[in-house]
Amino acid sequence: MTTNARLRALVELADTGSVRGAAERLVVTESSVSAAVSALAADVGVPLVRRNGRGVLLTPAGERYAGYARRILGLHDEAMAAARGEADPERGLLRLAAVTMAGEHVVPALLASFRVRHPNVTLRLEVAHRARVWPLLAHHDVDLVLAGRPPDELAAGIRAVSPNTLLVVGPPGLAADFAPAAATWLLREAGSGTRDTCEALLVALEVDPPRLTLGSPGAVIAAAEAGLGVTLASRQAVARQLADGGLVVLPMPGTPLHRPWHAVSHPHATAGTDLFVTHLLERPELGWTAPPPAR
């Protein structure tokens, strides 16, 4: 088994929490996973896993090593994509990730436009909440992230920005006597940036209203339209409902909020990444511009 295969076995063991789960993901036998992790431990010179009942857990050393393994594997994939893209950018690979709101309401149009001009670029997209997508970029598992403002350590990689406005919306029947403290607030899942922003707004108002957590932007918007409560959402996500009258903008101190979308890569981007960013900036109808100069 190659070193990369051994590293991947450890990462899958860390992610799934079991040898069986790692083996199922890798489509290998459980004994192969165990042998791979044992070989890594022999190379490192310290135990990477320990028995826990009938299963195994990573040791602190194993957890630390798994973090490096993720970055090594991501860099290896990135290096292969960079080399192939450098040879022929029009036939390269572009690995994208987007937060859920952008993935559902922004990215499809961008990819459709890009595909028309660059049909032979292989595209991969992962859509998840904020707490998931930024580590993907940090570990080099993706080449470009489309999301809100990045963590400080990744801010140097901002390549393009696009307007995004957050509004409080709800069913028309609430418009006349909307009270933030009395309404039921429909929230995204834990890890969502929009959820964190909404909670911060409520804290600033010093109110503690009823809350209902749903699993996706689509579910939250549908629940608001059905009359279950109010929510904070991107104008892009509720454009149809506002136009149809199914939802209305509700007055809320501190809103609207301007939270631009950011396209963020590593400073040393692949040719496919540069091709995509150039496409964003050269097509005004897509609404993306170069970031303002850093202060």
Image (tube, rainbow, N blue to C red):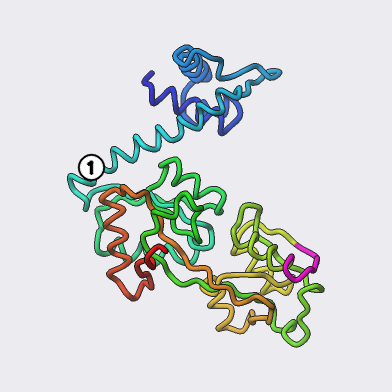
Q: Where is residue 249 shown, x and y percent of the image?
A: 64, 81
The foreground one among 284 and 216 is: 284
Q: Which quadrant holds residue 285?
A: bottom left
Question: Which residue is pictured at 68% across the width and 59% down the height?
Answer: 214
Number of marks in picture = 1
The foreground one among 221 and 165 is: 165
Q: Where is residue 210 shown, x and y percent of the image?
A: 80, 65
Picture layout, residue 76 above or below residue 137: above
Picture layout, residue 41 above or below residue 222: above
The foreground one among 80 and 104 is: 80
**Left or right: 121 with respect to 150?**
left
| Residue 210 within the segment the image draws in magenta | yes
Question: Which residue is pictured at 17% across the width and 44% down the height?
Answer: 87
Question: Which residue is pictured at 69% across the width and 68% down the height?
Answer: 201
* Residue type beneath disc 1: Arg
Q: Where is residue 108 shown, x and y percent of the image?
A: 42, 63
Q: Where is residue 277 shown, x and y percent of the image?
A: 32, 60
Report the quarter where the C terminus lies: bottom left
- Label 1: few (<14), some or many (≥20) within 10 Å? some
**Left or right: 103 with respect to 247?**
left
Residue marked by disc 1? 84
Task: Kindly state the secondary structure of the residue where label 1 is placed.
Answer: helix
| Residue 34 within the segment the image draws in magenta | no
Outermost residue toward the bottom in this view: 176
Question: Which residue is pictured at 50% across the width and 32% down the height?
Answer: 67
Q: Which residues are magenta?
A: 203-211
Report the quarter where the N terminus lies: top left
